[in-house]
Amino acid sequence: MRDPKTHITQLLENISQKDDQKSFEELFKLFYERLLNFCIHYINNREAAEEIVSDVLFKIWVKRKELSHVLNMETYLFIMVKNQSINYTKQFSNYRFVYLEESGSHELLNINDPQKELERKELIFKMDQAIETLPQQCKIIFSLIKEEGLKYKEVATILDISPRTVETQLVRAMQKLDKILSPYIVSKKAPQKNKTKIVTVVKSFLFTLLF
């Protein structure tokens, strides 16, 4: 009887190195129901859970070349589904039933500032471009933390490296992104005396995206 962990590792190797669709289909079937049941416990909505799990699993195919470093695929998938479920819940927390005096009715409105949200998306686009310039391991670690919302220990487990290495690589990524993004967050014409404030603003922005 074959070892499940070894089998999963082989499937991932076929997917990442050989673009093997049959191995991906097998991996999909292997985890789909387990991940779906897990997701439903978080959001109590089967239709939304099906979409979340499918998105997570298809991301394995889309990012297959990057995932060759993932040594614990099962942990990776469950953490991704957990975080996507939490994000799904948070998404609806931005909406409130607001009473409008003019119409005398309640409407469901997004309480976020549209202009600030637009500016934030533009900065995220710039940051995604900057991430592509990072060294491979540094980029993978940053993406797992920034995009998937994983913790240091979770990334260390998935990549089979020490939490200290994760922290070091993340610091390097932050330093480089800090340098690249500064001009887009604060005007290049800012007075010299405000340099410290500029660094604080950039790091604060990156921190809010990460955590």
Image: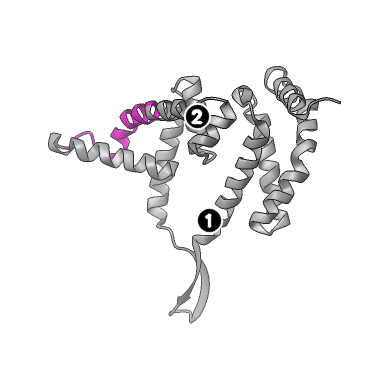
Colour scheme shown: one colour
Residue 170 point in image, percent of width and height = 42, 30
- Taking the image as shown, residue 89 lies to the left or right of residue 94, namely right
- Asked if labels 2 and 1 touch by Cβ distance under 8 angstroms, the answer is no
Amino acid type at mark 1: Lys
Residue 204 point in image, percent of width and height = 33, 43
Where's the N terminus, which quadrant? top right
Majority SS type along the magenta span = helix
Q: Nearer the viewer, residue 194 or 39?
A: 39
Indicate the secondary structure of the residue bearing disc 1.
helix
Q: Mark 1, residues whose alpha carbon is within 10 Å: few (<14), some, or many (≥20)?
A: few
Residue 64: assigned label: none
Instruction: Confirm whether the magenta stretch covers residue 185.
Output: yes
Amino acid type at mark 2: Ile
Residue 8 point in image, percent of width and height = 74, 28
**Residue 26 sits in quarter:** top right
Q: Nearer the viewer, residue 79 or 26?
A: 79
Which residues, given as a range, are shown in magenta? Answer: 172-190
Q: Which residue is at 67% across, 22% downward?
A: 16
| 188 w.r.t. 33: above or below | above
Indicate the secondary structure of the residue bearing disc 2.
helix
- Taking the image as shown, residue 150 lies to the left or right of residue 19, namely left
The residue that label 2 is drawn on is 141
Among numbered discs 1 and 2, the one appearing first in the sequence = 1
Q: Can you tell which of label 1 and label 2 is closer to the viewer?
A: 2
Q: How many marks?
A: 2
Q: CA distance from mark 1 to mark 2?
A: 24 Å
Residue 148 point in image, percent of width and height = 54, 39
Q: Nearer the viewer, residue 4 or 188?
A: 4
The residue that label 1 is drawn on is 90
Instruction: Confirm whether the magenta stretch covers residue 90.
Output: no
The single residue placed furthest to the bottom in the displayed view is 104
